[in-house]
Image: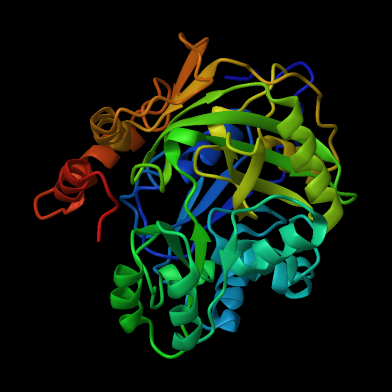
């Protein structure tokens, strides 16, 4: 934990507001952001599903705003809701989005959110269409092609005829993903990253996609020939990194295709330089969370996901001066200096409720993550913290409550070694 003194001098008059749309109460990233800024004296507020979520009970939370949304509501309704919360806070606050819906809404309504009677919210000023484009699998692939950044070979079928043509020429297996990030909460074509092993399977699955399939089809990067890397960073208005970190994903849930369950900080100057140059080329500002797969067959890092927001596992990364990406954003937006410092190489991050089933699934598959240190230099748990215990016990209560499907889904998925659904 970083101290409040020394180089880390936040503006404690400017609170932070966790902005999330959708029903996912067990979100450790929001809890991590509340703790990160709360520990250095920044007042923290959060949008929550109710007053009994892990985020809502954190000792570092000044106030919760229960507001159930799906992320598919009319943007005007969501903007007005944010403004209503801003009026209740009564002063400017730094917006910290935890999902693509929130990040895109903020970017596309900067004037309404930045100019208000209470002084306006604070957020990185980014080209308004860019967050939506990088969050889109098709949009990201097009940007990679335009700026010479490697990504998996991708097809974007617009009709059933396109799928049939792809099925007759593609090399299987392939991976299907929803074309747009927002589809996962509206009417997703696939439940997540879905491996398809044959043309016959593709045709059968595609029957449910309608005449205008909302998917992209990508080459499959075999896990025995690949390494999963992550980059988290914060970029200023000139797209220059004020904080940039690299690490290796050891396990994810669902296996090989979901959120980080276990990861290590690993220095990778080559990857850091690649990511910084790509962000500079496209002109992005703010926090990023990148997922990349290093393909040992051709020696290239291939960009899988560009999340224009903080990642749930952002607390994996902290510099020797106490900076993570959320602290960097708050300091920068409030006119403070962001202290430089090396990342804590060898540090690891564990998400307790999903790492155990992930461990079982990975051991069944025999996969071992390259570059993971033999011994961690330190460990941060997503939920359990000695100075803030309530979120951990609240997570357990919701995770284990009667009627909850979490444990069954985890058991079923670990048995099959594939994502739920």
Residue lying farthest left? 402
Residue lying farthest bottom? 211
| Residue 315 visible in the picture | yes
Picture mark count: 0
Q: Locate residue 10: give its quadrant.
A: top right
Q: Does residue 121 lie above or below 371 as drawn?
A: below
Q: Residue at x 30, y 69 (%)?
A: 201
Q: Position of residue 389 (x, y in %)?
A: 34, 28
Tell me, what colour scheme is on the image?
rainbow
Q: Does residue 260 lie above or below 80 as drawn?
A: above
In the image: residue 142, left or right of residue 73? right
Q: Does residue 121 lie above or below 292 as drawn?
A: below
Q: Residue at x 65, y 30 (%)?
A: 246
In the image: residue 88, left or right of residue 207? right
Q: Residue at x 40, y 56 (%)?
A: 173
Q: Position of residue 175 (x, y in %)?
A: 44, 59
Judging depth in this view, the residue of 393 and 217 nearest the camera is 217
> In the rendered view of the protein, which quadrant contains the N terminus?
top right
> In the rendered view of the protein, which quadrant contains the C terminus?
bottom left
Q: Locate residue 125: give its quadrant.
A: bottom right
Judging depth in this view, the residue of 180 and 319 nearest the camera is 180
Q: Residue at x 81, y 57 (%)?
A: 147
């Amino acid at each position: 934990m970083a101290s409040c003194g020394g180089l880390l001098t936040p503006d404690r008059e400017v609170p932070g507001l966790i902005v999330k749309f959708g029903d996912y109460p067990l979100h450790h990233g929001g809890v991590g952001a509340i703790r990160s800024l709360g520990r250095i004296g920044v007042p923290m507020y959060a949008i929550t599903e109710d007053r009994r979520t892990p985020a809502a009970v954190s000792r570092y939370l000044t106030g919760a705003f229960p507001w159930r949304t799906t992320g598919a509501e009319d943007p005007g309704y969501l903007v007005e809701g944010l403004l209503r919360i801003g009026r209740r806070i009564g002063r400017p606050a730094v917006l910290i989005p935890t999902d693509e819906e929130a990040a895109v809404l903020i970017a596309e309504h900067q004037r309404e959110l930045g100019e208000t009677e209470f002084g306006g919210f604070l957020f990185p000023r980014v080209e308004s269409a860019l967050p939506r484009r990088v969050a889109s699998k098709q949009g990201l692939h097009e940007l990679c092609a335009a700026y010479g950044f490697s990504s998996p070979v991708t097809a974007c079928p617009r009709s059933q005829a396109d799928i049939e043509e792809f099925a007759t020429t593609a090399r299987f297996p392939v991976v299907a993903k929803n074309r747009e990030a927002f589809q996962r909460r509206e009417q997703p074509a696939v439940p997540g990253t879905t491996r398809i092993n044959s043309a016959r399977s593709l045709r059968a699955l595609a029957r449910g996609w309608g005449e205008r399939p909302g998917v992209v089809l990508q080459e499959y990067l075999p896990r025995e020939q690949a390494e999963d890397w992550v980059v988290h960073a914060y970029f200023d208005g000139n797209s220059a990194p004020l904080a940039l970190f690299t690490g290796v994903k050891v396990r994810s849930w669902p296996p090989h295709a979901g959120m980080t369950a276990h990861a290590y900080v690993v220095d990778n100057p080559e990857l850091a330089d690649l990511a910084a140059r790509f962000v500079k080329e496209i002109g992005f500002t703010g926090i990023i969370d990148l997922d990349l797969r290093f393909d040992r067959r051709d020696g290239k890092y291939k960009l899988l996901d560009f999340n224009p927001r903080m990642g749930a596992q952002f607390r994996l990364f902290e510099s020797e001066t106490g900076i993570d990406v959320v602290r960097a954003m708050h300091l920068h937006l409030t006119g403070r200096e962001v202290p430089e410092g090396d990342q804590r190489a060898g540090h690891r991050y564990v998400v307790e409720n999903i790492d155990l089933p992930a461990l079982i699934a990975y051991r069944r598959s025999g996969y071992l993550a390259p570059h993971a240190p033999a011994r961690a230099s330190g460990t941060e748990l997503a939920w359990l913290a000695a100075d803030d215990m309530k979120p951990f016990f609240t997570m357990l209560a919701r995770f284990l409550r009667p009627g909850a499907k979490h444990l069954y889904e985890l058991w079923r998925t670990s048995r099959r070694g594939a994502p739920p659904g």
